[in-house]
């Protein structure tokens, strides 16, 4: 019996008990349980098989290599024809859920569809083929794009200067906090050793503060989800270097007392950092720089195109107000009086904290962001945010009967729901709800974050989903809540239709199996 057949049968066995219970109607039609895990290329290799209609390499390819430098025997590579190789990798790619394959409601991540024209732009040979050390004279097009992007990001944020170097949001945070540290040091203000973060903050905020040598002071959130102003005031002192705020917060709520908060921060001599991961909610509506923030980062891969989630390249540009511009990483892109573009020279801006990344960051991500911003234009970006906020509020209104929504009232681009009451009534946890959504054909939302909400689901639909798609997802979430009440055991077993069942995620992260081992047949290829 072939491996595929065995695997299909194994998968079917999992489904059959459900059918016997008359539950199969609740499984989304989008699920395909097929021969999910496949043999490797080495295992499907057949000696002598190849694609030889087009000779490759040409028959005389070895003639120019002296015999002494040739291999004695060909390398032990798998032997397949081209369709076999293509089908192998296409089948593997289909095992992954992707934003091109379905809705991806991960709160705090802004997983939106990325216009394909941006992929075309990023692959234009003039951008994609440029050597990172090409002299400025040969890189005018790319430098112009970067210079314009610096300006666009400054305008959108209401800030004065931008570096494009950092490779991700977390890297942008580190860059921003190092800039703040350089600012205090340049003023001889050496006693500031603390960074304040709210308890709803993303884990990268306190991690950044520690990496930059600061002590993290965590303050609680107020009952309405906003920053507790009194707690902030009590925590501020001459030791405070910076306060890191996320606005809208990771609860999807806009900080209403922002002016008061920032006044208190500045009155203490500290600087205000804004985590800009949630810019998708406020483009064209709120400029952090104009509101009084001193520095912020963008996540271009969240707000301005670039598919992410698989660990691919990102970009976390940092925008600052004028008093921090001297410390930004070097080199920035500058424009000469004659209109030509160049990178700053070594030592040109002596206060700079130096480089934070090789070359100019992830240039392809910058091209996509530029294309996205130009295609939408100013009013278009505002529409992006308005639509994202509308979609989130629509979803929130649809699911709040089935799940508890701890912060009622309008949200921004994402909202928090909780399975707390469901757990009390049925024993079903948020993790079970998330796993069951997979059986209904959806990627689960972010769960157990932010940490301050028990049994938390953080849901972000983005502006790119249609009403039909939002309804389908809401229907699935509501259906899962119904299943939890009627068949809680079904949710403990979920997912039953995915290529793999419940993984031990801690083991998978700490002891990943990265080496291929032949399957003996005795092992199950489908870890339970
Ligand atoms: C995603 C995110 C970050 C980190 O950004 P990366 O690009 O993943 O490094 C920081 N803060 C918040 C609120 C985020 O959502």
Image: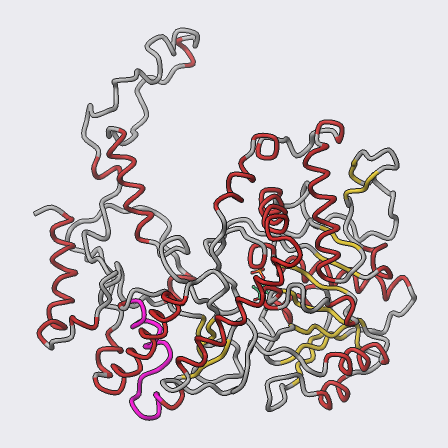
In the orientation shown, which residue stands out farthest toward the front? 379
Viewer-proximal residue among 69 and 55 = 55
Left or right: residue 94 compared with residue 261: left
Instruction: Describe residue 523's horizontal placement relative to residue 445 as left or right.
Output: left
What predominant SS class does the magenta segment belong to? helix
Q: Looking at the picture, does residue 153 appear above or below residue 288? A: above
On the picture, is 95 further left or further right than 24?
right
Q: Quadrant of ligand 1?
A: bottom right
Quarter assignment of residue 242: bottom right
The figure's colour scheme reads secondary structure
Question: Which residue appears farthest toward the right when viewing the image?
Answer: 188
User: How many dots with numbers?
Assistant: 0
Q: Write down the region rendered in magenta.
A: 422-438
Where the C terminus falls, by quadrant? bottom left
Q: Position of residue 478 (x, y in %)?
A: 32, 79
- What residue do we see at 32% from left, 75% from top? 475
Name which quarter of the figure residue 180 lies in.
Answer: bottom right
Give how far across and how far down residue 231 sits, in percent. 71, 89
Residue 470: x and y in percent read 39, 69
Give the residue displayed 51% in from the left and 43% down from the top. Answer: 117
Q: Is residue 340 above or below residue 505?
A: above
Based on the picture, tell me whether residue 121 belongs to the magenta stretch: no
Relative to 372, is 41 above or below? above
Q: At 24% across and 66% down in the image, what residue appears?
A: 28
Please tell me in which quadrant of the rendered image residue 130 appears.
top right
* Residue 431 colored in magenta in the image: yes
């Amino acid at each position: 019996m072939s491996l595929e057949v065995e695997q299909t049968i194994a998968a079917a066995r999992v489904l059959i008990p459900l059918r016997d219970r008359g539950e199969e109607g609740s499984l989304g039609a989008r699920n395909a349980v097929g021969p999910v895990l496949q043999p490797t290329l080495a295992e499907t290799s057949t000696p002598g098989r190849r694609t030889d209609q087009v000779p490759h390499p040409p028959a005389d390819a070895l003639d120019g290599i002296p015999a002494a430098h040739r291999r004695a025997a060909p390398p032990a590579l798998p032997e397949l024809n081209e369709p076999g190789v293509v089908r192998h990798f296409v089948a593997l790619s289909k095992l992954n859920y992707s934003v091109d394959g379905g809705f991806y409601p991960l709160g705090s991540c802004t997983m939106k569809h990325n216009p394909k024209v941006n992929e075309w732009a990023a692959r234009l040979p003039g951008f994609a083929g440029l050597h990172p050390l090409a002299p400025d004279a040969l890189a005018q097009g790319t430098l112009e794009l970067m210079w314009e992007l610096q300006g666009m990001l400054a305008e959108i944020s209401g800030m004065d200067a931008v570096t494009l170097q950092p490779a991700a949001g977390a890297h942008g945070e580190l860059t921003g906090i190092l800039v703040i540290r350089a600012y205090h040091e340049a003023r001889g203000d050496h006693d500031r050793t603390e960074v304040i973060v709210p308890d709803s903050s993303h884990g990268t905020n306190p991690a950044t503060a520690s990496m930059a040598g600061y002590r993290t002071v965590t303050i609680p959130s107020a009952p309405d989800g906003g920053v507790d102003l009194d707690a902030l005031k009590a925590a501020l002192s001459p030791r405070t270097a910076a306060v890191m705020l996320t606005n809208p917060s990771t609860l999807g709520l806009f900080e209403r007392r922002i002016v008061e908060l920032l006044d208190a921060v500045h009155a203490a001599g500290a600087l205000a950092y804004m985590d800009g991961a949630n810019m998708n909610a406020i483009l064209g509506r709120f400029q952090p720089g104009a509101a009084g923030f001193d520095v912020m980062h963008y996540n271009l891969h969240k707000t301005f195109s670039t598919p992410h989630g698989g660990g691919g390249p990102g970009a976390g540009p940092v925008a600052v107000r004028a008093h921090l511009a001297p410390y930004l990483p070097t080199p920035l892109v500058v424009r000469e009086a004659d209109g030509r573009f160049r990178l700053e020279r070594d030592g040109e801006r002596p206060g700079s904290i130096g480089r934070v990344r090789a070359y100019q960051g992830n240039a392809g991500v910058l091209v996509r962001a530029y294309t996205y911003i130009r295609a939408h234009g100013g009013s278009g970006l505002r529409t992006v945010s308005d639509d994202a906020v509308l979609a989130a509020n629509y979803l929130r209104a649809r699911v709040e009967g089935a799940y508890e929504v701890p912060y009622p009232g309008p949200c921004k681009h994402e909202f928090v729901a909780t399975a707390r009451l469901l757990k009390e009534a049925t024993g079903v946890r948020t993790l079970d709800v998330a796993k069951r959504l997979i059986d209904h054909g959806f990627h689960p939302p972010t769960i157990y974050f932010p940490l301050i909400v028990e049994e938390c689901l953080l849901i972000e639909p983005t502006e790119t989903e249609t009403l039909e798609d939002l309804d389908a997802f809401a229907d699935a979430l509501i259906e899962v809540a119904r299943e939890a009440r009627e068949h809680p055991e079904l949710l403990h077993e979920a997912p039953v239709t995915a290529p793999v069942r419940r993984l031990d995620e801690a083991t998978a992260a700490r002891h990943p199996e990265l080496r291929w081992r032949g399957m003996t047949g005795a092992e199950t290829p489908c870890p339970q």
